[in-house]
Image: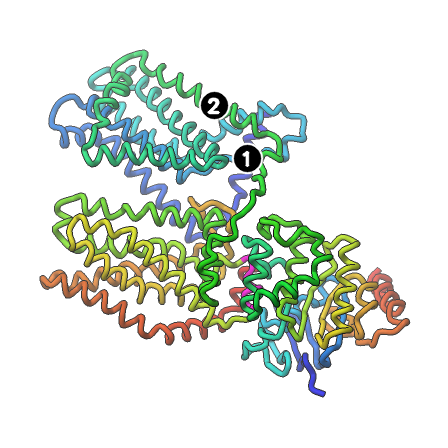
């Protein structure tokens, strides 16, 4: 029976939407997999040298153990966001003569076969032989690998448990987010150190013959926990979300603000009421922390180039993430849009206001960077104006070319539906051009003038907005039949 | 009298094959026009051409003498519902009506009044229920779509298969409602249906589309239903 289920699972994977992606996307993903795989492999092989480089000669295994807890936290967060829940939709098996418990065990066990579980092994095993074996012997190296595998699987089952539970209770997600983010941020700001705890907990794995048995206990408990949770939800009606009462008033204020207010309100409803768009929104908010990478490092903080990149990226990321699929989000009712009584130009003006709102929101969220010095404020302001005046217009125009439908109900992570070459092409003017332009001034020793140029470029462009909207509408009218035909193919 | 819908030599080709060709068709204001035909006869294609959702390979369609392909102003006096692709599925029905009402420039009072006539049809399942359109049944989605198309009292109403997916009671209610609308106002109705009974009961004029061509265009009389029945029976025999 297990064999049959595995066979079905295999077919499901092979015949899934992912495999039917176009070649460009497949190659890109293949490249990413290879890239990260090689990085992890290199990390594992060079780990002893790396640790000695940072900490000086000495206790390599101890240094390694210091970081494991840190890794575990990041790993859980990454898995939570990126890893798909393996749902072999068991629905069709429930009516067949198969025991439910067997189905659930299968569901849980087959979830192990996952890129996220392979990745850590790529650096654990090389390190076991280059780091552990010389000091503690080959047997210890093997046992160490087994123990680490146990830790990785604990991560795995904890992440899917959190994810499953958070699907029902949203506050679980918030609590987990606060705890994990709090621990990591506190560590980075030197409020506390996770290193001694980590060293104490994970150190023995590399030095004690029996330590590998320890992770098995939490692993078994987490497995039981997942199993018990699934067991409670084996009836179909429990999987269906209770059609809860929805709030209609959240955007009431905007709706009163004329046609464009109503359009923006509608689109905000689209964003907050669908899974994938919600993901886009959250990732945007999350990436507001991106600048910390650069502002936290002295050499970057004293320069300008990377900070401007961070500024452009942070103020623009939400708009770019959402805007690159503009109109495609509405593919399921595109025919309706074409028959409604607003003109195409009005439609696009509404879209402009939406994108502008996103830029302003991100600008406000990133205002606290001014604590790193007023410089950050000038940089982000220039970036904001560029995004407001130039990037918006580019995204609007680019949106007339998309013709791939998007199913809003699917999640955001690793979802490439609707992706085409357009998305890659437009990032060049959005991110690269302003940086290059600025670097011209920066190399001449006039970074301030660079900021002024970029900011004014945005402002001047904004003055020509009516012209751009008109051109966009014109192009839209030419392309709309192809677009509508594309969107109808689901 | 000026025609409210006019088609001049309209042709649509897919992959070298003509799927619709109508040399000439005119509808007068206030007429109710029923469109029947088997699957693939070109009914939806005709609707889409009239609404400028697909581009014709030849010819032009006019709504109130506005060429739909080059002028957007027809949107102001045309209501339409072809399929769920017209509904914004993450809104509640009330939000959807508010949005359409706003586009049509209706005051809150006008909107309430215009929706009031759907009271029976909605059977208490549509309004005031805080549920997204995507969570409604197919039948209820259709009711929302048809009601939305009628908001703002358009001069022209285009409905593709409005009776499909509706339960028997609702079918009769909708039919009577459209009939009443036809009698009391000057609206021009274009309705396709697989149910010959429904269309013959209230459409003044019925056309049969077959393989992309208008093969019949009749003023409805007692003879119409038998005539249509024998036409479609013939088709089976002809093919069998």
Coordinates of residue A402 in the picture (x, y in percent): 46, 62
Q: Residue shown at 77%/62% (left/top)?
A: B194
Instruction: Write down the quadrant of residue A82 in the picture.
Output: top left
Does the residue at mark 1 contact the one at mark 2 (Cβ under 8 Å)?
A: no
Distance, label 1 to label 2, CA atoms, is 19 Å
Element type where label 2 sits in the image: helix
Badge 2: chain ID: A
Question: Is residue A333 part of the magenta span, yes or no?
Answer: yes
* Earlier sequence position, callout 1 versus callout 2: 1
Report whether residue A291 is seen: yes
Coordinates of residue B80 in the picture (x, y in percent): 64, 67
> Which of labels 1 and 2 is toward the front?
2
What residue would you read off at disc 1?
A88
Instruction: Write down the quadrant of residue B169 in the picture.
Output: bottom right
What residue would you read off at disc 2?
A225
Location of the C terminus of chain A by quadrant is bottom right
Q: Residue shown at 69%/55% (left/top)?
A: B122
Q: Residue shown at 39%/39% (left/top)?
A: A81
**What colouring style does the render use?**
rainbow
| Label 2 packing within 10 angstroms: few (<14), some (14-19), many (20+) | some
Q: Residue shown at 37%/76% (left/top)?
A: A467
Residue B141, label in figure = none
Seen in the picture, residue A329 relative to B109 is either above or below; the reply is above
Location of the N terminus of chain A by quadrant is top right
Q: Which residues are magenta?
A: A332-340
Residue A376 is left or right of residue A408, and the answer is left
Q: Main secondary structure of the magenta part?
A: helix
Seen in the picture, residue B38 relative to A228 is either above or below; the reply is below
Marks 1/2 same chain: yes
Q: Nearer the viewer, residue A374 or B128?
A: B128
Residue A455 is left or right of residue A489, and the answer is left
Question: Is residue A179 part of the magenta span, yes or no?
Answer: no
């Amino acid at each position: 029976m297990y064999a049959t289920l595995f066979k079905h699972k295999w077919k499901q994977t092979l015949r899934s939407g992912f495999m039917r992606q176009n070649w460009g996307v497949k190659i890109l993903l293949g490249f990413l997999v290879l890239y990260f795989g090689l990085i992890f492999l290199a990390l594992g092989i060079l780990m002893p040298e790396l640790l000695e480089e940072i900490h000086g000669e000495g206790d390599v295994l101890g240094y390694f153990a210091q970081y494991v807890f840190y890794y575990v936290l990041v790993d859980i967060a990454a898995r939570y966001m990126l890893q798909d829940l393996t749902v072999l939709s068991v629905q069709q098996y429930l009516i067949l003569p198969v025991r439910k418990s067997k189905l659930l065990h299968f569901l849980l066990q087959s979830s192990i076969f996952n890129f996220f579980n392979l990745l850590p092994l790529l650096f654990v095993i090389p390190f076991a032989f280059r780091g552990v074996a010389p000091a503690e012997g080959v047997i210890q190296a093997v046992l160490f690998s087994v123990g680490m595998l146990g830790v990785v699987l604990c991560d795995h089952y904890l992440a899917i448990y959190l994810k499953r539970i958070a699907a029902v209770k949203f506050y679980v997600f918030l609590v987990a987010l606060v705890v994990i983010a709090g621990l990591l941020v506190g560590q980075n700001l030197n409020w506390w150190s996770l290193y001694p705890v980590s060293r104490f907990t994970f150190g023995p794995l590399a030095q004690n013959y029996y330590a590998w048995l320890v992770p098995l206990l939490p692993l078994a408990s987490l497995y039981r926990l997942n199993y018990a949770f699934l067991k409670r939800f084996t009836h179909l009606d429990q999987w269906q979300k209770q059609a809860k009462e929805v709030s209609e008033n959240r955007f009431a204020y905007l709706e009163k603000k004329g046609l464009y207010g109503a359009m923006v309100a509608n689109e905000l409803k689209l964003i907050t009421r669908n899974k994938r768009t919600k993901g886009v929104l959250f990732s945007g908010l999350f990436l507001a922390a991106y600048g910390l990478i650069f502002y936290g490092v002295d050499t970057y903080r004293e320069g300008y180039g990377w900070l401007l990149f961070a500024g452009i990226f942070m103020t623009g990321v939400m708009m770019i993430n959402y805007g690159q699929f503009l109109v495609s989000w509405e593919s399921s009712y595109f025919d309706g849009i074409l028959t409604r009584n607003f003109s195409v130009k009005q439609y696009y003006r509404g879209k402009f206001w939406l994108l502008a709102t996103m830029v302003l929101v991100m600008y406000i969220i990133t205002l606290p960077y001014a604590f790193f010095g007023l410089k950050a404020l000038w940089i982000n302001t220039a970036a904001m104006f560029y995004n407001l005046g130039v990037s918006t217009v580019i995204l609007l125009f680019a949106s007339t070319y998309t013709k791939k439908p998007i199913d809003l109900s699917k999640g955001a992570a690793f979802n490439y539906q609707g992706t085409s070459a357009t998305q890659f092409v437009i990032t060049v003017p959005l991110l690269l051009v302003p940086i290059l332009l600025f670097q011209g001034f920066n190399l001449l020793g006039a970074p301030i003038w660079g900021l002024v140029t970029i900011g004014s470029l945005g402002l001047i462009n904004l003055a020509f907005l009516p012209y751009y909207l008109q051109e966009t509408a014109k192009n839209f009218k030419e392309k709309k039949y192809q677009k509508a035909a594309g969107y109808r193919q689901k | 009298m000026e025609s409210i819908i006019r088609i001049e030599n309209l042709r649509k080709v897919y992959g070298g094959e003509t799927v619709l060709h109508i040399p000439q068709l005119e509808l007068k204001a206030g007429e109710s026009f029923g469109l029947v035909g088997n699957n693939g006869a070109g009914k939806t294609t005709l609707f889409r051409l009239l609404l400028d959702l697909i581009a014709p390979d030849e010819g032009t369609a006019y709504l109130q003498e506005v060429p739909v392909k080059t002028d957007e102003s027809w949107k102001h006096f045309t209501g339409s519902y072809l399929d769920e692709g017209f509904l914004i599925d993450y809104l509640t029905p009330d939000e959807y009506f508010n949005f359409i009402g706003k586009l049509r420039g209706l005051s809150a009072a006008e909107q309430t009044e215009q929706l009031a006539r759907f009271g029976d049809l909605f059977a208490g399942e549509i309004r005031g229920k805080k549920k997204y359109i995507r969570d409604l049944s197919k039948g209820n989605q259709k009711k929302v779509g048809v009601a939305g198309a009628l908001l703002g009292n358009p001069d022209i109403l285009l409905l593709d298969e409005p009776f499909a997916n509706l339960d028997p009671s609702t079918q009769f209610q909708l039919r009577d409602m459209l009939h009443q609308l036809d009698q009391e106002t000057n609206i021009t109705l274009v309705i396709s249906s697989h149910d010959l009974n429904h269309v013959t009961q209230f459409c003044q004029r019925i056309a049969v589309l077959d393989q992309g061509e208008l093969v019949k265009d009749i003023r409805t009389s007692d003879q119409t239903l038998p005539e249509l029945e024998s036409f479609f029976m013939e088709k089976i025999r002809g093919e069998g």
